[in-house]
Amino acid sequence: MTIMVSPDDLKREVQAALADLRECEAELHKGEASKAADVIRNTISRLEGLLHIAQHVQRS
């Protein structure tokens, strides 16, 4: 299986994952461990998706 993804799409996904991690950090600073855990789970899912794409993307 080959996945076609533009560099801009990958860049947006990485930026979104970074934003999630920043949100997690902010929630931890506020003492909101439960919210931080939710953000961590979402970020893990996003990064797993990026890893899947990276493993199957067509190389030029």
Image: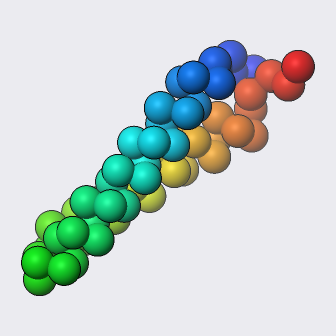
Q: Quadrant of residue 35?
A: bottom left
The image shows residue 40, relative to residue 6, as above or below, that is: below
Quadrant in the picture for residue 58: top right
- Report the front residue among 60 and 52: 60
- Residue 49 sits above or below residue 21 on the image: above
Q: How many marks?
A: 0
Q: Position of residue 3 (x, y in %)?
A: 68, 21
Observer-nearest of 29 and 60: 29
When asked about the image quadrant of residue 32, the answer is bottom left
Question: In the rendered view, does 39 fall on the left or right side of 58?
Answer: left
Q: Tell me the quadrant of the picture where the N terminus can be found.
A: top right
> What's the residue at 63%, 18% (across, down)?
6
Q: Residue at x 74, y 28 (%)?
A: 57
Q: Is residue 51 visible?
A: yes
In the image, is residue 43 above or below residue 12?
Answer: below
Residue 33 at least partly seen = no
Tell which of 55 and 36 is nearer to you: 36
Q: Is residue 11 left or right of residue 36?
A: right
Give the side of residue 35 with respect to residue 57, left or right. left
User: Residue 7 in the image: x percent, y percent?
Assistant: 65, 24
**Residue at left offset 29%, top offset 71%:** 25
Where, quadrant-wise, is the C terminus in this rendering?
top right
Colouring scheme applied when the structure was drawn = rainbow
| Viewer-closest of 19 and 45 | 19
Left or right position of 6 against 40: right
Residue 33 percent coordinates (x, y): 17, 79
